[in-house]
Image: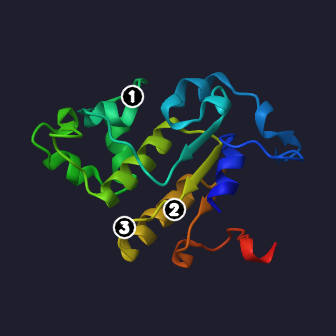
C-alpha cells in the first residue's frame, strides 16, 4: 500500500505503464496560482514539486522551530487560519496551552509533540496547503480510535471536493460515500 502512495506521489517511478488521475498522467497535472501559493514543497517529493498534490508520509518530521513555522513550512498563513486548521484536527486547545502558543519552539531539545500529535500536525499542514489531491500514508497511526473517527469525519466534510487517497489498516476511518479499494483484491 505504501508503494501505491509512493507511485501516486511520484516518489517512485513505475517500471511500465502510466499512472493517471482521470486521464492526466501524474507527472503532468497543471497547477493553479492558488494551489501554488498554498502548497508546502517540503511535503511534496522533488519529482512532484509544482503539482497540486500533497503527501503526508507515515513519519511526520518536526523541524526545530516554532509551531507556526512547523505548520506554514515557508508559506504565510494568518494566526486565524493556523488555529482553524488546528481546530479541525483537535489541536487548537493543545496549541493555546503551549507556553508561547504558536510561537512555542518544537523539536529536539524543545517541546516535543507525541506521535499522534505529530500525525495531526501533518494533517493540519495538508489543510493549510489546500491541494485538490491528497495522499495520506497511515494517517491515524498513533491516535486513539475515537479521536481518529472524529477528526476524519470532520476532514471528510472539509475535503469533500478533493481526491483523497488514504493508506490505512483502520477500517473505522472508512466513512459513508467513500470508495474503498482493497489491495488484496486487485
The x and y percentages for residue 160 are: 62, 55
For residue 84, side relative to residue 175 (left or right): left
The answer to whether 44 is drawn above or below residue 86 in the figure is above
Instruction: Using the image as rendered, state which of residue 138 and residue 163 is in the foreground.
Output: 138
N-terminal label among 1 and 3: 1
Distance between the alpha carbons at the discs numbered 1 and 3: 26 Å
N-terminal label among 1 and 2: 1
The answer to whether 164 is drawn above or below residue 175 in the figure is above
Furthest toward the left, the residue is: 99
Residue 77 is marked as: 1
- Name the residue: 60% across, 25% down: 36
Determine which residue is flagged by label 3.
143
Determine which residue is flagged by label 2.
138
- Name the residue: 79% across, 77% down: 185
The quarter holding residue 20 reads top right
The x and y percentages for residue 119 are: 39, 54
Distance between the alpha carbons at the discs numbered 1 and 2: 26 Å
Furthest toward the front, the residue is: 15
Distance between the alpha carbons at the discs numbered 2 and 3: 11 Å
Quarter placement of the C terminus: bottom right
Quarter placement of the N terminus: bottom right
Label 2 crowd bin: few (<14), some (14–19), many (20+), radius 10 Å:
some
- Name the residue: 12% across, 36% down: 100
For residue 159, side relative to residue 70 (left or right): right
Q: Nearer the viewer, mark 1 or mark 3?
A: 3
Could you tell me if residue 162 is visible in this image? Answer: no
Residue 104 is marked as: none
N-terminal label among 2 and 3: 2
- Name the residue: 88% across, 47% down: 16
Q: Secondary structure at mark 2?
A: loop
What count of labels does the image hold?
3
For residue 107, side relative to residue 120 (left or right): left
Amino acid at each position: 500500500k505504501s508503494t501505491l502512495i509512493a507511485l501516486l506521489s511520484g516518489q517512485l517511478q513505475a517500471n511500465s505503464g502510466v499512472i493517471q488521475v482521470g486521464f492526466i498522467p501524474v507527472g503532468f497535472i497543471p497547477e493553479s496560482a492558488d494551489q501554488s501559493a498554498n502548497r508546502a514543497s517540503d511535503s511534496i517529493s522533488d519529482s512532484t514539486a509544482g503539482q497540486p498534490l500533497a503527501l503526508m508520509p507515515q513519519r511526520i518530521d518536526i523541524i526545530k522551530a516554532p509551531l507556526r513555522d512547523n505548520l506554514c513550512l515557508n508559506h504565510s498563513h494568518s494566526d486565524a487560519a493556523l488555529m482553524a486548521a488546528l481546530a479541525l484536527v483537535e489541536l487548537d486547545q493543545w496549541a493555546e496551552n503551549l507556553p508561547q502558543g504558536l510561537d512555542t519552539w518544537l523539536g529536539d531539545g524543545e517541546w516535543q509533540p507525541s506521535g499522534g500529535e505529530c500525525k495531526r500536525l501533518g494533517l493540519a499542514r495538508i489543510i493549510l496547503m489546500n491541494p485538490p489531491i491528497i495522499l495520506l500514508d497511515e494517517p491515524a497511526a498513533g491516535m486513539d480510535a475515537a479521536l481518529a473517527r472524529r477528526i476524519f469525519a470532520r476532514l471528510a466534510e472539509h475535503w469533500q471536493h478533493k481526491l483523497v487517497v488514504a493508506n490505512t489498516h483502520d477500517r473505522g476511518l472508512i466513512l459513508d460515500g467513500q470508495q474503498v479499494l482493497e489491495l488484496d483484491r486487485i
